[in-house]
Image (cartoon, rainbow, N blue to C red):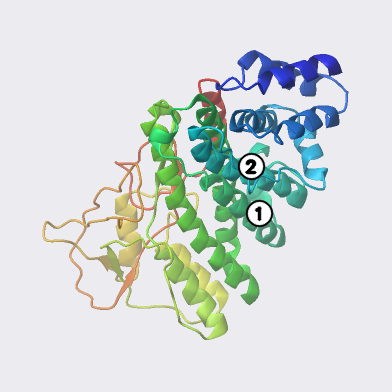
Amino acid sequence: MGSSASKAALAATTEEPMEPGPKHLADLTQYINETHMSVAHLADILSKKTGSSSWVVVFKALVTVHHLMVHGNERFIRHLAARHSLFTLHNFLDKSVGEGYAMSIFIRRYSRYLNERSLAYRQIACDITKVKRGASGVMRNMDTDRLLHTLPVIQTQLDALLSFAADPDELRNGIVRAAFRLLLKDSLRLFAAYNEGMLNLLGKYFDMRRSQCRESLELYAKFLARTAKLTRFLRVAEQVGIDRNSIPHLTQAPCSLLEALQQHLASLEEKKDFLCPCGLQHTVTLSIPYRPTGNACARRTWFADYFPYTIFTLPSPQACWSRAAKYGASIETDASGGTNWQLSTCASTSAIWTSVSGPPSPHTVTSTMAFPPLMSPQSLVSSPPGLMADELELTAWAGQQSQSM
């Protein structure tokens, strides 16, 4: 079996300028899934292939490694994570052919992501793209300390993935396109875990210590920015011909939930500075005649009242108005009598919230109303603003799509 695996690895990384053959990848996946032999020998072969001066050989070796990370037994990535060093390709450049310059850039970016993927496994002792999701999943049930350790690791891995940054016209080459497909699968699963972790963190926010609130606020701000970047990444996938039904729609919420979180932190730190780093803006404001300044329990109750669908709920627009009217609040309207949600040019989404009509505002004291981002496989054009899914089924959905990608 070791000999056959070696032959398959060599066949998958030839100098022929096309993506690794499906048969060779299947043979290697079967090898690490069904045998008890060490994966070290296979990893050594692929690692040596990345030392080639040919961009074709190096790129195909990286694609093969990534394929085994995604589809192979976890012991493969565990072995890579245990290595002292993995890919040292930050200076790689193939000058022998004209295409080598452009492809070398992607090789450097791609190898960095694979390094970060392995490092993330070492830091959190699991492959976050394969953990159980949903109400009983890993990210939904982490305690605060572990969340504050895990979410930055996910952020770093996602940053490395999104730095691949290929344009549609750069994905015509079969090898780089194969890498992009694998990155797309990782991005969906990685962001699903990221989203669930943020839901969990927001649910714990008003019971946290001051230092934990500060960390959580920063994490949420970064989460908004990465959601916008992922939206652009997914748009490229649509443009290169990947079936639209296999691409989820991300609805980006405005930044103003940050203000509510900031107000709570300010009450702990006696600071009131607030900055929205993600550049999202909107024109809907909620008039709030009263803001509690009492203890955390009172602030948490106020938060739940004013953000009724922040986490796991879907009230009707009428219920939202009833909740707002409870405290004498209302939503400002445009000339047509409806609200007008919009995003600035820095954020691109596949779905924009529709207007929710309501009475004109008689109040002058206003505060922005917003909710966390939503991730859903379906378009939310007819949904109320700020909808957050109760059960995020993206992972199962993405798995169903993986065979067609």
Can you name the residue that lies furthest to the bottom here?
270
In front of the other: 346 or 91: 91
Count how many numbered circles sit on residues in the image: 2
In front of the other: 49 or 97: 97
Residue 314, image x, y percentages: 41, 47
Residue 221, image x, y percentages: 49, 63
Image position of 332 with respect to 245: above or below:
below
Q: Residue at x 50, y 84 (%)?
A: 271
Image position of 145 with respect to 85: above or below:
below
Residue 385, image x, y percentages: 34, 52
- Circle 2 residues within 10 Å: few <14, some 14–19, many ≥20: many
Mark 1: secondary structure: helix
Q: Is residue 143 left or right of residue 188?
A: right
Instruction: Report which residue position mark 2 lands on.
Output: 111
Residue 46: numbered disc = none
- Precedes in sequence: disc 1 or disc 2: 2
In front of the other: 271 or 275: 275
Instruction: Report which residue position mark 1 lands on.
Output: 153
Q: Is residue 5 left or right of residue 216?
A: right
Mark 2: secondary structure: helix
Residue 225, image x, y percentages: 46, 57
Can you name the residue that lies furthest to the front here?
96
**Whether residue 287 is visible:** yes
Q: Are marks 1 and 2 in contact (CB under 8 Å)?
A: no
Q: Image quarter for residue 82?
A: top right
Amino acid bearing label 1: Val
